[in-house]
Amino acid sequence: MNRLKMGQNLYLIDLKQEIEGFRNFIGSWIYTGERTFIVDVGPSASINMLIGYLNDLGVDRVDFILLTHIHIDHAGGIGELTEHFPEAKVVCHERAVKHLLAPEKLWEATKKALGKIAIAYGEMKPVFEKKIIPSNEFHEEGFEAISTPGHAIHHVSYFYDKYLFAGEVGGVFHMVNDAIYQRPATPPKFYLEKAVESLDKLLKKGKKEICFGHFGMHNDSEEILLKHKEQMFLWKDVIADQMKQQSNKDALVDNCIKELLLADRLFMPYHQLDDDIKQRELFFVKNTIDGYIGYINSMTNSASTNPSSFQ
C-alpha cells in the first residue's frame, strides 16, 4: 500500500519511482488537521501521485510545505506542487532559497552525482520567491525548525506536536521482519562533526516519534538517534581501517561493505532485504562510503599540514 496512516492525523506516502527497487524508499509526510502541512514532496516524476493521494484525503488546501533539504528526491516536485496549491508557503533552509528560485545549478550537480537516477526523478521547476519562508524566519506557533547539517549543509529538521520530522539526519531507516535496518546517509562532501552536532541538537529535545524521509517511523527518537550516533563513529573506524589496508578503490569499497555487515548490527538486516531493494541500497551505500573516504582523507591531510592542531 502506498498510503500508510501513521497517527491520528499523520500519513506517510510511499512515492514509488519508475526505477527498480525504488519502493518503500522516498516518503512524503502529510499532516491534516487545523493546519495541513506536508514534509518533503519527492521528485518531480511522482508529484502527480502525491497530488492524487492528497485528493483522496480530501486535502484542498495546504498551509505549509516543509522541506528538510533540497535534494531532488525530497524537493524535486516543489515547483509543480506550489502551482497546484498556490496558497502554500514553502519552508526551507536559508541557504537553499537561491536554489529553489533558480534550480539550474542544483539540477546539473544532481545529474553529475546520480546520472540516470536523476533523469528518472525529473528536473526541478523554480518556486516564486513570495512563497518561500527561510527556516530561520519561520516562527509559526507549534512548529520548531532546527538547522541540522550533515547529510547536507541546507538540512532542516522540524518538530510539531509529538513528532520529529528528521529527513536524513538519522540516516536511512527500515523495519525488516521486525528488525531495524539503518545506515548513514553521508554523500560527499561529508563532515562527521557537523552530523554529530546535529544529532546532539535533536537529542536535547527529548523523546519524540521520529519520522524519516527514507522510510518510516520509530516511537523513540532518543533510542534511534543515540544508536545512529554510535553507528556513525563505527563506520568511520571500519572505513579508516580498511583504507590503511587497501589502496584500490573498488576493492576498498567492497571490503568496507563486507566488514560493516559483520560489525554493525543496524546494517546487518541488509541480508533480509528484497533483492531489488538490496541493489538500490548498494548504490547508496557506496555513495555513503565515498563520503566517509573523502572526510577521512581531508582529516589526514589536515593533520599532516598542521600537526600542532592535535597537540
Image (cartoon, helix red, strand yellow):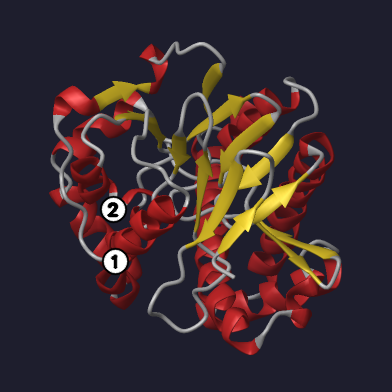
Checking the image for residue 77, the label placed there is 2
Residue at image coords 76%, 69% = 260
Nearer-the-camera pick, 58 or 210 = 58
Q: Position of residue 281 (x, y in %)?
A: 58, 73
Q: Secondary structure at mark 1?
A: helix
Q: Tell whether label 2 touches label 1 (CB within 8 Å).
A: yes
> Residue 249: x percent and y percent?
52, 76
C-alpha distance separating marks 1 and 2: 7 Å
Closer to the N terminus: mark 1 or mark 2? 1
Q: Quadrant of the N terminus?
A: bottom right
The percent coordinates of residue 197 (x first, y second) are 63, 28
Residue 186 to residue 203: above or below: below
Horizontal relation, residue 157 to residue 261: left or right: left
The residue drawn where x is 53% and y is 81% is 250
Q: Position of residue 101 (x, y in %)?
A: 15, 36
Task: Examine the rendered structure and indicate whether residue 305 appears above or below residue 202.
Answer: below
Give me the residue at 72% from left, 20% from top. Answer: 205
Task: Answer with the quarter of the image where residue 209 lies.
Answer: top right
Query: Looking at the rendering, in which quadrant would you find the C terminus?
Result: top right
In the picture of the structure, the residue carrying the numbered disc 1 is 45
**Mark 1: which amino acid?**
Ala
Callout 2 amino acid:
Gly
